[in-house]
Image (cartoon, rainbow, N blue to C red):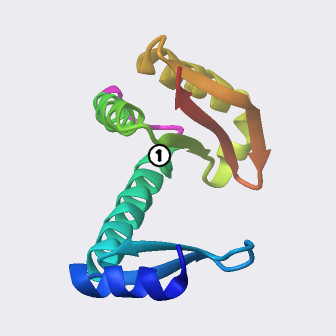
Amino acid sequence: MSSREAQLLAKEQGVDLVEIAANANPPVVKIIDWGKYQYQKMKEEAKNRKKAREKQSELKQMKIGLKISDNDLNIKVRKMRGFLDDGDRVKIMIVFKGREMAHKELGPALLDKVVALLGEDALMEGKPQMSGRNLSVQVRKK
């Protein structure tokens, strides 16, 4: 239909005539309520942003000393399980203090104990790495 007819039709209905594809021959237009269209578009974008935020998993850190007691370790493991259940990844850091650096073999043993306490649903990403005075590994849910 001609542009004049489309403008009259839109004016009769009390809505707007919106150009959809300007580069087409002839240009494509649509008769819509512009305010309602903008509102729907804004709602859809907000919904997409919310979904994108939900999908992102955060990286949580948990520092553990070599001389940690069993009860304290169980509390930290319970907290890590909560992070994993929320869909987050956890970076477990074994911190060596002072002369503990002379006994580096205790770090991997403690790390294995922590992963065992987390259960079978926890999966280590990569191998434990030593950086400075910290032994760290990332864990995620299977």
Which SS class for mark 1? helix
Residue 66 painted magenta: yes
At a point 41% along the width and 51% down the height, the residue shown is: 51
Decide: is 39 above or below 140.
Answer: below
* Amino acid residing under circle 1: Lys
The mark tally for this picture is 1
Disc 1 target residue: 55
Q: Nearer the viewer, residue 34 or 105?
A: 34
State the extent of the magenta-drawn residues as a range. 65-70
Query: Is residue 90 left or right of 76 when viewed as pictured?
Result: right
Residue 13, image x and y in percent?
23, 78
Residue 93 painted magenta: no
Q: Nearer the viewer, residue 80 or 65?
A: 80
Question: Image quadrant of residue 24?
Answer: bottom right
Query: Is residue 107 left or right of 7 when viewed as pictured?
Result: right
Q: Which of 81 and 58 is in front in this view?
A: 58
Main SS, magenta region, reads: loop
Residue 61, image x and y in percent?
50, 50
Query: Is residue 33 left or right of 66 when viewed as pictured?
Result: left
At a point 69% along the width and 74% down the height, the residue shown is: 26
Decide: is 2 above or below 72.
Answer: below
Residue 48, image x and y in percent?
43, 57
